[in-house]
Amino acid sequence: MKVLLATQKPFAAKAVEGIESILKEAGHEVEKLEKYESQEDLIAAAADAEAMIIRSDKVTAEVLEAAKKLKIVVRAGAGFDNVDLAAATAHGVVVMNTPGQNSNAVAELAIAMMIYMSRTQFTPATGSEIMGKKLGIQAFGNVGRLVGAKAEALGMKVMAIDPFLPAEKIIAGGAEPSGDH
């Protein structure tokens, strides 16, 4: 099977090595399209691909129309907002994602931004500490729980609301429920 690894913003080199190693060991051919300039480049590269691995790349109806052999698109990340799901279904292409794979990186960035902002973006002005502050988290999924745990470790009081989770799940995740559940 020919697998197209299409990333305008390439994965870390170690990740690409791992992906290539696993796919080649399984007998698949790997083609890389990294740092491409236009959607036309993706359309051309997808023409003979049977599988595609992407990040935030746009898999449009035009890409799917050109990719006559395509059977599956895997998005490295959560969500499908960059894939035309109706067109994929119409072309018989399965679309999958990898939720949770980047959750820790996102949580660390959220904490880093809180510190950055509380320290007045590292300007000479007087900032404040986040220790002792309350943090409200709206949506207590993978990222929300990780942000909450990191915030609690930094001495913050963590509160969360999630319309899909009962209060006991939020408590079990280490936060105080906020709002109606």
Image (spheres, rainbow, N blue to C red):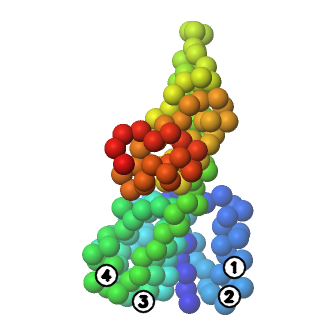
Camera-nearest residue between 154 and 85: 154
In the image, residue 66 lies at what x, y percent? 35, 81
Compared across the picture, whether 165 is left or right of 174 comes to left
Looking at the rendered image, the quarter that the N terminus falls into is: bottom right
Q: Which amino acid does label 4 sit on?
A: Thr
- Looking at the rendered structure, the secondary structure element under dot 2 is loop
- Looking at the rendered structure, the secondary structure element under dot 1 is helix
Tell me if label 1 and label 2 are in contact, CB under 8 Å. Answer: yes
Q: Is residue 66 above or below residue 19?
A: below
**How far is the residue under mark 3 from the one under mark 2?**
19 Å
- The residue at which mark 2 appears reads as 26
Point 66% across, 73% down: residue: 19
Q: Which of marks 3 and 2 is nearer the N terminus?
A: 2
- Looking at the rendered structure, the secondary structure element under dot 3 is loop
- The residue at which mark 1 appears reads as 22
Which numbered disc, 3 or 2, marks the residue closer to the eye?
Answer: 2
Q: Is residue 153 above or below residue 60?
A: above
Point 59% across, 23% down: residue: 132
For this orientation, the residue located farthest to the front is 168
Residue 89 tag number: 4
* Residue 108: quadrant of the picture: top right
For this orientation, the residue located farthest to the top is 125
Q: Which of marks 1 and 3 is nearer the N terminus?
A: 1
Q: Which amino acid does label 3 sit on?
A: Lys
Disc 1 residue crowd, few under 14, some 14–19, many 20+, Cα 10 Å: few
* Residue 67: quadrant of the picture: bottom left
- Looking at the rendered structure, the secondary structure element under dot 4 is helix
